[in-house]
Image (tube, grey):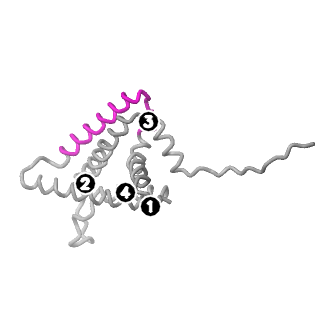
């Protein structure tokens, strides 16, 4: 008598699920997760602000819209496309977050014009603080991530947090 073999088909994991599983594996400690909720938005803001503060050439064909396009625009477009490939719903949430952060960047630009600190300086200090926080979280966690994973996870961190948020509010991401 032969044993019956069940035809079990493996469902391939989506890229986003693999990335989230990798990311979450080294972020289990509750304090490290809390640090991520603070530091990831700080890092996101600072990267956006640093790209925003790099001088962009004047393009005649833009006419009155010169100034609305800057290096951050290209960063947003690249990230938006990458996130859309992973999860359309999370990419829309990310665009809303980037829009909110852009409004804050503009306020810092206005502050700079009225005599406040330079945008690039504010963003550099914020970036250093955010990265330092993540390194403290990594120390608390006790698990190191490789540098290459760190570069990949710069993009994954924000949507990982949005994924957690979307689960908490009952929003389907797919």
The first of marks 1 and 3 along the sequence is 3
- Answer whether residue 122 is magenta in the image: yes
Residue 75, image x, y percentages: 35, 55
Q: Which residues are magenta?
A: 121-150
Please, is residue 96 above or below residue 17 in the view?
below
Nearer the observer: mark 2 or 1; the answer is: 1
Which of the labelled discs sits on residue 101, or is there none? none
Label pair 1/4, CB-CB below 8 angstroms = no
Query: Circle 1 sits on which residue?
Result: 89
Q: What residue is disc 3 on? A: 28
Residue 52, numbered circle: 2
Q: Secondary structure at mark 1?
A: helix
Task: Identify the residue at the far left of this view.
Answer: 115
Within-10-Å neighbours for mark 2: few <14, some 14–19, many 20+: many
Percent position of residue 151, x then y: 41, 41
Q: Is residue 19 left or right of residue 117?
A: right
């Amino acid at each position: 008598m032969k044993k019956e073999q069940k035809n079990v088909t493996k469902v391939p994991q989506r890229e986003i699920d693999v990335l989230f599983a990798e990311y979450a594996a080294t972020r289990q400690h509750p304090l490290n997760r809390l640090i991520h909720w603070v530091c990831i938005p700080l890092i996101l803001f600072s990267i956006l602000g640093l790209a925003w503060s790099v001088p962009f050439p004047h393009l005649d064909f833009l006419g009155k819209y010169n100034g609305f396009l800057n290096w951050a625009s290209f960063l947003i477009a690249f990230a938006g496309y990458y996130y859309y490939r992973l999860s359309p719903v999370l990419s829309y949430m990310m665009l809303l977050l980037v829009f909110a952060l852009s409004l804050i960047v503009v306020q810092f630009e206005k502050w700079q014009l009225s005599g406040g600190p330079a945008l690039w300086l504010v963003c550099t200090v914020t970036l250093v603080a955010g990265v330092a926080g993540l390194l403290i979280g990594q120390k608390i966690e006790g698990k190191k991530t490789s540098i290459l994973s760190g570069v990949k996870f710069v993009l994954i961190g924000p949507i990982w947090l949005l994924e957690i948020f979307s689960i908490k509010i009952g929003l389907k991401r797919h």
